[in-house]
Image (cartoon, rainbow, N blue to C red):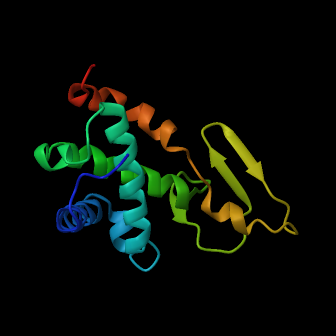
């Protein structure tokens, strides 16, 4: 997707979105030392591409439809949590900040590492955006342009 936003429009939009994401998610707001602005911007970029591809509209459409900002923010929050949150045994979550991860859980699959293995790359487990997008299809459907 080629962006149709000017640099100034993108900067303003992303500043609003970063504020919205931090306001909507206590996890991201309270762990500002872990969730950097760059991580949030990457998530915004990635999810904007998937939203625009799904609804068949340019990114400028986000300026015209501010109600989409809430869906976009939810997708970013879910994506950041899926990548950087490890579910604990009591159902709570904790941020994975260690260089070594013992296990990764995604849906009903679990990958466990023995204590001697080097699992540094696994500390940022990746949930494909297509998986997240599927859960948002119903909410995005009303904005979709049919050819």
Q: Position of 23 compared to 42: left or right? A: left
Q: Position of 143 compared to 39: left or right? A: left
Q: Residue at x 37, y 37 (%)?
A: 53
Q: Position of residue 48 (x, y in %)?
A: 34, 49
The vertical placement of 52 against 27, above or below, is above
Q: Position of 33 compared to 66: left or right? A: right
Q: Residue at x 55, y 44 (%)?
A: 128
The vertical placement of 99 against 58, above or below, is below
The vertical placement of 12 against 135, above or below, is below
Q: Position of residue 21 (x, y in %)?
A: 29, 60
Quadrant in which the N terminus is drawn: top left
Q: Position of residue 36 (x, y in %)?
A: 42, 74
Q: Residue at x 51, y 37 (%)?
A: 131
Q: Position of residue 49 (x, y in %)?
A: 38, 46
Quadrant in which the C terminus is drawn: top left
Q: Residue at x 69, y 61 (%)?
A: 122
The number of numbered discs placed on residues in the rendered structure image is: 0
For residue 114, which quarter of the picture? bottom right
């Amino acid at each position: 997707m080629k962006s149709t936003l000017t640099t100034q429009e993108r900067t303003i939009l992303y500043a609003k979105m970063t504020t919205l994401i931090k306001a909507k998610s206590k996890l991201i707001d309270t762990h500002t030392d872990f969730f950097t602005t760059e991580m949030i911007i990457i998530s915004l970029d990635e999810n904007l591409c998937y939203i625009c591809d799904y609804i068949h509209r340019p990114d400028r459409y986000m300026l015209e439809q501010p109600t989409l900002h809430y869906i976009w923010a939810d997708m970013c929050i879910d994506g950041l949590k899926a990548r950087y949150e490890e579910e604990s045994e009591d159902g709570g979550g904790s941020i994975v900040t260690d260089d070594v991860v013992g296990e990764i859980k995604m849906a009903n699959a679990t990958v466990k590492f023995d204590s001697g293995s080097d699992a540094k790359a696994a500390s940022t487990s990746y949930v494909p955006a297509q998986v997240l997008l599927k859960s948002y299809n119903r909410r995005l459907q009303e904005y979709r342009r049919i050819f």
